[in-house]
Image: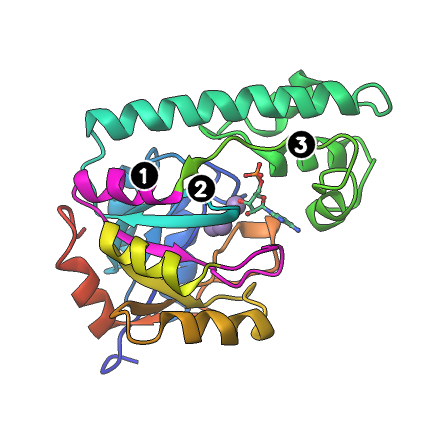
Amino acid sequence: MHEHPQYDLHTHSHFSDGTTSVAEIAELVAAAGLAGFALTDHDSVRGWEEGRAAAASYGLDFIPGIELSTRENGVSSHILGYGFNPRDEKLLTALQQIRLMRVRRVQEIVAKLSCDYQISWESVQGVSASAETISRPHIADALISSGIVADRTVAFNTLLHPSSKYYVPLQELRTSTAVQLLRKAGGCVVLAHPAAFRNKTIVSREQLRSLREAGLAGIELRHPENDPQKLARVCEAATGLDLRITGASDFHGSGKPNRVGSYTTGGDTVAKLREQMLLPS
Ligand code: AMP
Ligand code: MN
Ligand code: MN
Ligand code: MN
């Protein structure tokens, strides 16, 4: 393992929709024999300091990151930003707006659900006390604590599913705008799980080419939720666009079955990505 250092470049803590602390992630990364990890909470950089300290205590490399939900030309995407200036004014303003929009959206979904189920905004707040970003997984947790569903997976497949009458869509940034925002803040940008099972429409070659022009550096082709059939088409679309291929687990603690280190990125690729980061650690 020492000769071929491996990194997990996509993890979530309880500062967004993960269920563990940042320190617990570092412990799992060390136990998996990895060289380092990136913390990529949704719309939040709150865990960065703790990530640096916890990584150092285990002798791990730390890469500060974030995940943003975006949409363009009818294609919904998630993008990972790494090593940007967390105090960039434009980015900070955008993140604050996104988190506020998320709160309103979760409140709307909860209001609809509360007509038929024992759930309230207060109960969602109760299960998301440590989170800076509130999202559907926290509604799932409130439903679990009331005994309405067994786990997050059941909640997402039923009451929280986009086809559910309780669903309210999320307002998303344009994908190319988000890439530019992160690039201008000094970040390196990777397209997350481009062939995820829940993606209805996958990114086209033309769109990938224009995202590449906007500053996209990599694409997360190794991810537990990439559907092999869609993945073949995404790989084809990405061929020859000079994008780095990454792998990561998208760890969410007990919120998802994804385990730390189940998919990884080699040290050579990480070094190349780090060249684009204002803050490579
Ligand atoms: P939202 O951003 O509020 O639309 O919720 C989407 C988030 O829920 C994503 O960040 C996923 O990590 C999480 N998620 C999606 N599907 C599931 C699932 N089946 N089980 C657990 N978490 C999920
Ligand atoms: Mn998530
Ligand atoms: Mn995602
Ligand atoms: Mn994620």
| Mark pair 3, 1: CA separation | 29 Å
**Residue nearer the viewer, 280 or 62:** 280
Q: Which residue is mark 3?
A: 139
Residue 177's disc number: 1
Q: Which residue is mark 2?
A: 70
- How far across and down, in percent of the image, does residue 3 sit? 22, 83
| Mark pair 1, 2: CA separation | 9 Å
SS label for mark 3: helix
Earlier residue among tags 3 and 2: 2
> Does the Cβ of the disc 2 residue fall within 8 Å of ligand 3?
no
Report if residue 165 lies within the magenta region: no
Up-down relation of residue 166 to residue 226 (above or below)? above
**Residue nearer the viewer, 171 or 264:** 171
At a point 21% along the width and 42% down the height, the residue shown is 84
Is there a contact, CB below 8 Å, between mark 3 and mark 1? no
In magenta, the rendered stretch is 175-202
The residue at the far right in this view is 116
